[in-house]
Amino acid sequence: MSPAVTPGAIPGPPAEPMAAGREKDEWPLWEVFVRSKAGLDHKHCGSLHAADPQMAIQLARDVYTRRQEGTSVWVVRSDQITASDPGEKAAYFDPMEDKVYRHPTFYVLPKSLDHM
Amino acid sequence: MPSTSSSIAVSSDPAVQYLLRIGDTCLIHAQRLGEWCGHAPIVEEDIALTNMALDLIGQARAVLTRAGTLEAALGGEPHDEDQLAFLRDERDFRNCTIAELPRGDFASTTVRNLALAVFFELLWERLAESTDEELAAIAGKAVKESRYHREHAADWVVRLGDGTVESAARMRAALDLLWPYVAEIFEADAIDEAAAAGGLGPRWADLQAPWRERIGAVLAAAGLAMPAERAFRSTGKTGRHSEHLGYVLAEMQFLQRAYPGGVW
């Protein structure tokens, strides 16, 4: 009996990996953004695994909007996001600490615009 | 909540029976979907399936409530949704047999979800024009839920049918297993005729052609063939069920039968 082709055998993983360097049995990760109501921004609310964009949108709907949290959902593959380096945090963000003049708080505004 | 554990008898009025077919199919289908809680292939799908089960329970509650008030309006004893769900015996359930079959593997769950979601989407679309205003209002809300259930199931059918050798084989096996139970949904009888004549709702037989068209499009996209129709007819709609419903009811009704009137 040849072990190579057995009728009814469970086939192995697909020949092509889903993405280079990624575990073959793991669906890609997606970041989920939900808009809570018209006019507001889409806000990041979490992530999930899904095989394709359509599945990611559906699962995001089921996982993140089941208590009426949303009116619109965006998903983006996590590996498509480029993030700043946490190690560079000090160089990137600390210098802004003492630049109060960058806040437009030195203008005298008319009373009617008080809440600008 | 029911205050006794004795079984109730339900009106044989055709309109009540028509509503029970809808409510019971939703209820038993939901019961089976709920079995995936904690067992779905991934946690996101686990949540999706149980969300759908809860949608179906909501539909069942509304329709059974309507059936119970209709019984009273016809001069019978009024029953609430809980009595109808928990105190009827197996023979008094009117769900289509396909809803009560064991959940099987994920492929059979997916095929059943598609078959029933497309059917309910078509049914609710028509019931939205029911002469029964309450039923029309329930349908207006439920059709949106069914539309999503259909979309979710259809995507899975395409994904698995057009997936690997293994997933396609399982989908074909699931279709062969469930298809004989599809025909019952569209079997015409006097209860359907009465509902159509009174404007309560469509003959389910009239939904068969659009159902086949919509299912056929999904199966074609999935690379799956629609199985041929056979002579076998299941009979859940008339109360003669498969051996599986009794076990579903035993689990579902146990608490109310053992502790009548028990509440959270």
Image (cartoon, coloured by chain):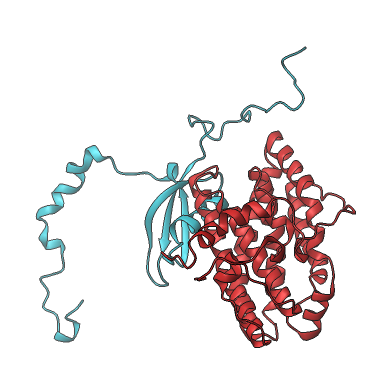
User: Residue A85, located in which quarter of the rendered image?
Assistant: top left
- Given residues B222 and A92, the one toward you in this image is B222
- For the C terminus of chain B, the quadrant is bottom left
Give above or below for B210 relative to B169. Answer: below
B118 on left or right of A69: right
Q: Who's red, chain-wise?
A: B
Q: Residue furthest right?
A: B231
- Given residues A85 and B37, the one toward you in this image is B37
Q: Who's cyan, chain-wise?
A: A
Question: Whole-percent x and y of residue B59?
Answer: 59, 69
A17 on left or right of A32: right
Residue at (12, 53) in percent of width and height: A97
- Given residues A58 and B99, the one toward you in this image is B99
Q: Is there any visible trace of residue A90 in the rendered image?
A: yes
Question: Whole-percent x and y of residue B182?
Answer: 78, 57
Question: Whole-percent x and y of residue A15?
Answer: 63, 28
Q: Is there any visible trace of residue B154 in the rendered image?
A: no
User: Residue B124, located in which quarter of the rendered image?
Assistant: bottom right
Residue at (72, 17) in percent of width and height: A4
Give above or below for B53 relative to A25. Answer: below
User: Residue B120, located in which quarter of the rendered image?
Assistant: bottom right
Question: How many numbered callouts?
Answer: 0
Give above or below for A7 relative to B98. Answer: above
Question: Whole-percent x and y of residue B122?
Answer: 72, 69
Residue at (56, 76) in percent of width and height: B80
Q: Residue furthest top?
A: A1
